[in-house]
Amino acid sequence: MTVIKINAITVPSEHGEEVAKRFGARTNSVDDAPGFEGFELLRPDDDRNQWLVVTRWADDASFEAWRNSDQAAHAHQAPPGAKPPKHLGLSAELWHYVVEVASSGNSG
């Protein structure tokens, strides 16, 4: 059963572009983790400042194994030889969901 992990990050408007840039630079850093099924970074399209990092996993064990791995720690560090990025002072909350009902979106 697919599980969804959503990291709800409060991003002040002045840091939005930098947050998108940092996530964009690491887009594929988790792709080869066992049980990983997908990732999306969602920017609000209204006056809210809460961005959502949505990941899909085969099960909770896969997520926890990645979360406690060197791969996860590496994904949150600056690339080798790069200056560590400025800390943006963001706050975050991790939400846990399971897919209860889904549609494949077939048209035709």
Image: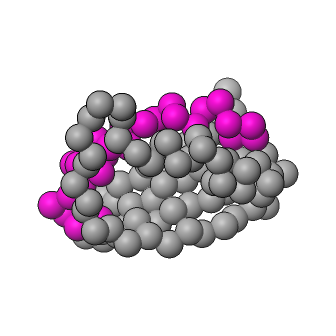
The quadrant of the rendering that contains the C terminus is top right
Query: What colour-coding does the image apply?
Result: one colour
Instruction: State the image quarter where residue 5 is shown.
Output: bottom right
Q: Residue at x 48, y 54 (%)?
A: 53
Q: Residue furthest left?
A: 14
Q: Residue at x 25, y 48 (%)?
A: 85
Instruction: State the image quarter where residue 52 is shown.
Output: bottom left
Residue nearest the viewer, comparing 2 with 71? 71
Residue 20 inside the magenta-drawn segment:
yes
Question: Can residue 67 be seen from the camera position used here?
Answer: yes
Q: Residue furthest right?
A: 1
For the record, the magenta segment spans 11-36
Question: Can residue 3 be seen from the camera position used here?
Answer: no
Position of residue 96 relative to residue 69, above or below, is below
Q: Residue furthest top?
A: 108
Q: Residue at x 28, y 68 (%)?
A: 89
Q: Where's residue 36, x and y in %?
A: 69, 40
Q: Is residue 91 left or right of residue 108?
A: left
Q: Where's residue 54, x and y in %?
A: 54, 53
Residue nearest the viewer, comparing 15 with 64? 64
Marker count (numbered): 0
Q: Residue at x 63, y 54 (%)?
A: 67
Q: Where's residue 23, x and y in %?
A: 38, 43
Residue 19 inside the magenta-drawn segment:
yes
Instruction: State the image quarter where residue 105 is shown.
Output: top right
